[in-house]
Image: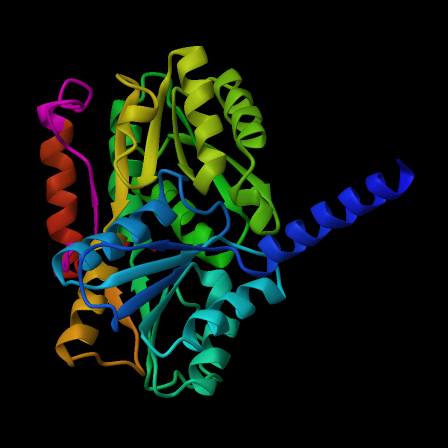
Amino acid sequence: MQKTGVALLLCVMLLSCTAKRDPRRVVEPAGSANFRVGLVFDVGGRGDKSFNDAAYLGLERAARELSLKLEYIEPGEGADRRTALEQLAAQPDVKLIVGAGFIFTDDITDVAKAFPDKKFACVDYTLDSTRKIPENLLPILFKEEEGSFLVGAIAALTSKTGVIGFVGGMDSPLIKKFERGYTNGAKYVRPDIKVEVGYAGLSGEGFKNPAKGKEIALMQYSKNADIIYHASGITGLGVFEAAREKQKLAIGVDMNQEAEAPGLVLTSMVKLVDQAVYNVAKSVKEGTFKGGAPLVLGLAERGVDYVYNEKNQSLITPEVRAKVEELRAKIISGELKPL
């Protein structure tokens, strides 16, 4: 009986280790078997209803419309991230590998150098003047501060209490761009507005802690904030839970998140990650891929925007809409700087 138990335990441990070494999931649409695109998710993985899902939707569309096959790997920690990139790059039929998130910057740069015959793209790549970008790597950057400036203006002009909030995931330079753009937009249209700010953590774990997101949001609502903008991945689901509980407004990020708190999502600051990665896959398929320098997308390129549709028109007045569109034009012309 004891031997049987030990054998069973060893079997379970072996299966567990095997699953950990090879966490791949493959989507097999009809199409060319010798042309795959690979995606390694950021912290939080598929199903975050935000950044990661947007990247997946873009490559899923590419697989469907361009007759490609898509393979994705869920996030890991440390060396797992590099291993996942290498795992995809080592496959002869994988032509493009996408890393979703700034955390990939160092690893994807090194792996791109090690596999010069493959194409790579990194969403939210961190630029460094001391680091040369390989010719087979395309950094995709967004002007988050521009979209955040607009939703900050919407929040300030809509707030009845004069207090709004911001919840960030990982306290990092990228998320600081969201925060600063939001705060600057709010104060530009309403100098006396108060902005409560909170972060869920100092590491990538800050992007996958809904309980912490809810805790921070409840605290900000208790301080009289009536609208909270989050830039925090899965952590933001806790912000929406707090909004539903307190029946106060929230602002989504990356994708249209109105379904997370129906009737309570003032707007969402969307980054068109899906369109960007689709375009990269298309360029690889058509032989027009260009790497070695960043692709930067802002309001002018329709890379960022805010949601305004039939579901939130009752929350954003015509006067607010007109003012924000005026600000959009000034940012695009260069007259107004969000940071």
Which residue is at a point 32% across and 64% down the rendered structure image? 141
Displayed quadrant of residue 93: bottom left
Q: On the picture, is 34 further left or further right than 137?
A: left
| 246 or 262: nearer the viewer | 262
Quarter in which the C terminus is drawn: bottom left
**For residue 45, above or below residue 167:** below
Main SS, magenta region, reads: loop
Residue 189 shows in the view: no
Residue 263 visible here: yes
Quarter in which the N terminus is drawn: top right
Whether 268 is drawn above or below 227: the answer is below
Name the residue: 56% across, 36% down.
209
Colour mode of the rendering: rainbow
In the image, which residues are magenta? 299-319
Q: Is residue 257 magenta?
A: no
Q: Position of residue 151 (x, y in %)?
A: 27, 38
View extreme (right): residue: 2
Residue 81 in the image: x percent, y percent? Answer: 54, 64
Q: Residue at x 41, y 19 (%)?
A: 243
Quadrant in which residue 250 is drawn: top left
Residue 306 belongs to the span the image colors magenta: yes
Q: How many marks?
A: 0
**6 relative to 278 in the view: left or right:** right
334 w.r.t. 90: above or below? above
Of 314 and 224, nearer the camera is: 314
Question: On the picture, is 176 further left or further right than 326?
Answer: right
- Residue 28 x/y as whole percent: 28, 55
Where is residue 234? Give x, y as percent.
46, 38
